Image: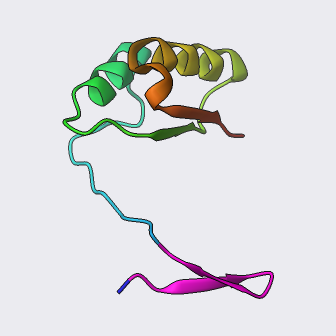
Amino acid sequence: RNGYVFINDVRITINAKVHTISGYSAHADQNGLIKFVTGMRKKPSHIKIVHGDDDAKNALAAKYKEVLGNDVEVEIGRS
């Protein structure tokens, strides 16, 4: 059902799920991204920001923390 992978000889169960989001643009502005996430019935517990320049990613991360509080982990990755 979930499958597994081996990492450093340790069997790890895969608990990931794939969600398809139709009608969402990856090029939305900050307000659009905030509206998208705050409009979800079940809020995400982890958001990873991987696109944009460093200032934009940091600003978006701060805004997510402002509107979602400590219930979400916001991670900034490299583009």
Relative to 79, 68 lies left or right: left
Q: Nearer the viewer, residue 42 or 28?
A: 42
The figure's colour scheme reads rainbow
Relative to 74, 27 lies left or right: left
Q: Is residue 40 above or below residue 65?
A: below
The quadrant of the picture occupied by the C terminus is top right
* Magenta stretch bounds: 2-14
Relative to 71, 76 lies left or right: right
Magenta stretch: helix, strand or loop mostly: strand
Q: Is residue 65 above or below residue 71?
A: above
Identity of the residue drawn at 77% across and 88% down: 9
Relative to 26, 41 lies left or right: left
**In the figure, residue 57 lies in which quadrant?**
top right
Q: Is residue 78 magenta?
A: no
Q: Position of residue 13 (x, y in %)?
A: 53, 79
**In the figure, residue 76 lies in which quadrant?**
top right
Q: Position of residue 4 (x, y in %)?
A: 54, 85
Identity of the residue drawn at 46% across and 86% down: 3
Q: Position of residue 63 (x, y in %)?
A: 49, 13
Q: Is residue 40 above or below residue 7?
A: above
Q: Nearer the viewer, residue 51 or 60?
A: 60
Identity of the residue drawn at 35% across and 87% down: 1
Count all numbered tags in the image, as a single digit. Answer: 0
**In the figure, residue 61 lies in which quadrant?**
top right
Q: Residue furthest right?
A: 8
Q: Position of residue 55 (x, y in %)?
A: 68, 15
Q: Is residue 10 magenta?
A: yes
